Amino acid sequence: MRIDRSASETALVVKRFDTPERVLVFDQGRLELMTVGGRAIGKGSYAPGWRWSRCATGPASPADALAEHVGMVLSGRVKMQLPDGSEIDLTPGDFFQIATEYDGWVVGYRPCEILYLSGVDAIVKRVRHME
């Protein structure tokens, strides 16, 4: 179901990732994108073996490196490693906020899905994708 009217008459906007506005496909993953309330949100789906550093396009620009990411793990497990070498495991239901460059990878044999609530534009700029 998709209800979307002009901004002047919009009382309710309903969107689903079943019909995203844009899809980026990359090695072992995909990022589905939509805009709600003028904000970009995304759902990342990652296969076992996926790693951020293998799908990102080189070092971040200073602006992208500082772009905050806020999200929630929907399924599977992901490990994040910060520049200081510290690591944290994130599991379903974990919300996270990260404001630094990091590496991340799927842990185990199950796919991982992450809902991104902010920082989506920086992810889109960095991911090496095929559309």
Image (tube, rainbow, N blue to C red):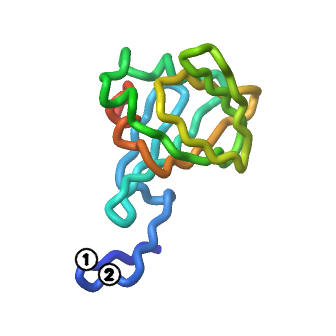
**Residues at circles 2 and 1 in contact by the CB criterion of under 8 Å:** yes
User: Image point 42% across, 22% down: which residue?
Assistant: 56
User: Image point 45% across, 29% down: which residue?
Assistant: 26
- Image-based side of 87 in relation to 114, left or right: right
Q: What residue did someone put label 2 on?
A: 10
Using the image, tell me which numbered label, if any, was put on residue 7.
1
- Image-based side of 105 in relation to 119, left or right: right
Tally of numbered discs: 2
Question: Which quadrant would the C terminus be assigned to in this image?
Answer: top left
- Image vertical order of residue 98 relative to residue 8, above or below: above
* Res 88 quadrant in image: top right
Describe the element under mark 1 as helix, strand or loop: loop
User: Image point 46% across, 41% down: which residue?
Assistant: 31
- Three-letter amino acid code at the position of disc 1: Ala
User: Image point 41% across, 50% down: which residue?
Assistant: 33
- Image-based side of 31 in relation to 122, left or right: right
